[in-house]
Amino acid sequence: MDARHGKSVPYVISDEVAKTYETLLADVQVKAALQFTEWDHQTTIEDQIRITEIPAPPFMEETRKLYYQACLEGLGLQDVTTDAEGNVFGVRKGSGNGPRIFVSAHLDTVFPEGTDTTVKERDGILYAPGIADDGRGLAVTLAVLRALNHANIQTQGDIIFGATVGEEGLGDLRGVKAFFRDHHVDGFISIEPDSPARVTYLATGSHRYRITYHGPGGHSFGAFGIPSAIHAMGRAIAMISDITVPEVPKTTFTVGTVSGGTSVNTIAAEAQMMIDMRSNSEQALLQLEEEVLRRVRQAAQEENKRWNSDAITIHIELVGNRPAGSQSSDAIIVQAALASAKAIGFEPTLDGPSSTDSNVPISLGIPAVTLGGGGQCGGLHTLQEFYDPTDGHYGVQKVLLTVLGLVGVKDVSDPLLKPTK
């Protein structure tokens, strides 16, 4: 999960959506499912701890995936599958008269192989890398499924429950991209660590590049007069830093890492930098990308010109492509999430754009939201990450009610979300 930014905006809950939730909250089975989430709270926390303690470094999610697959199978899902990318998911069949949605969290963490993910408890707070992001989301996904099973709720639409790979960093949303390339669903819910009050419905896009400059290299004194890969990269960084970007839509850039050279008395033969560009608009992002790459190439030309050479070359590699996207704040999936938060006693909040698994379906025009799994957390993406489970069951209730509103409950409520094919 990438950090969220932006101010909340006014929200809308239509009469149709409000009426649907009045009906759901009056139903005996739905009440039983909501009550179960409180009884089940400790089991959810135990799941969260067990999942967190199975390391899942970037591109190394296999062991955690196998464990999660066993969990999904144990909870009675049909057709539990692991795809070629490494995602795992199964289906809880509905009565056949509603939409199909995918409820998911992500398996991977940002932490490299060898990181100690042992969960430690102090004064009721759980500490471990990944305990919140996305140990919480993975545990909540299972908790929602348990609640449906306990109350024997028959939905109208099908619900796919599962977990994706590659949400973090250079994973580049590869799991959710693969899922939506190969499967059709009518809606998507991603679960991340956050307050049940918050609803993320807009997608910040990002393009990331690895830029490598190559040159002949040589002794700093004996070979003086040849171009330097580091000097070329330095020129590029200076040029990039002078780019002006719009405030609205918010558009940003940074050179995040640099490396190169072999010693203080060597003209560098190689230099490399990583560039991150982001925007809430795909068009603005593409315009920024074009300008950044123009300056990257210009820097090589200027370094060559300085020494009357053509020795500096560039290798440009796109290593991250997260699409931007938007949907209306009164989209049915957004209203359902807002009404669910209100139903459990929270004042709903529409978040500003962020970067999550929901980026992909939003960019494709498929209704999607990212919802908070409850409790409180901090230190995300650091070794000091923590999770406070107090009242965490509200996150489960929020996701549960959002799902039920969207897919409908047999003989109780019609689906708010309409099937598209």
Image (cartoon, grey):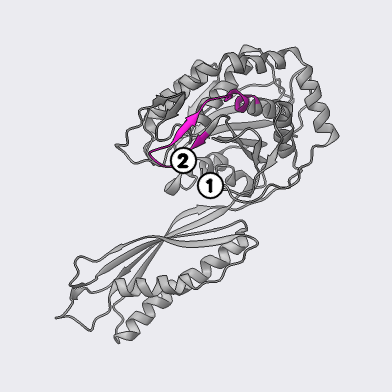
| Residue underneath mark 1 | 3
Q: Nearer the viewer, residue 163 or 178?
A: 163
The amino acid pointed to by label 2 is Leu
Instruction: State the image coordinates of residue 393 (x, y, percent, origin top left).
Output: 59, 23
Q: Residue at x 50, y 45 (%)?
A: 173
Q: Earlier in the sequence, mark 2 or mark 1?
A: 1
Q: Residue at x 37, y 40 (%)?
A: 111
| Residue underneath mark 2 | 380
* 107 left or right, relative to 20: left
Real-space CA distance between mark 2 and mark 1, rounded to the nearest whole angstrom? 9 Å
286 is within the stretch colored magenta: no
Residue pushed farthest front? Answer: 123
Q: Residues within 10 Å of mark 2 (few under 14, many from 20)?
A: many
Number of marks in the image? 2
Asked if residue 155 shows in the view, the reply is: yes
Q: Nearer the viewer, residue 116 or 61?
A: 116
Instruction: State the image coordinates of residue 128 (x, y, percent, origin top left).
Output: 40, 32
* 387 left or right, relative to 328: left
The residues colored magenta run 377-397
Q: Is there CB contact under 8 Å for labels 2 and 1?
A: yes
The amino acid pointed to by label 1 is Ala
Classify mark 2: helix, strand or loop: loop
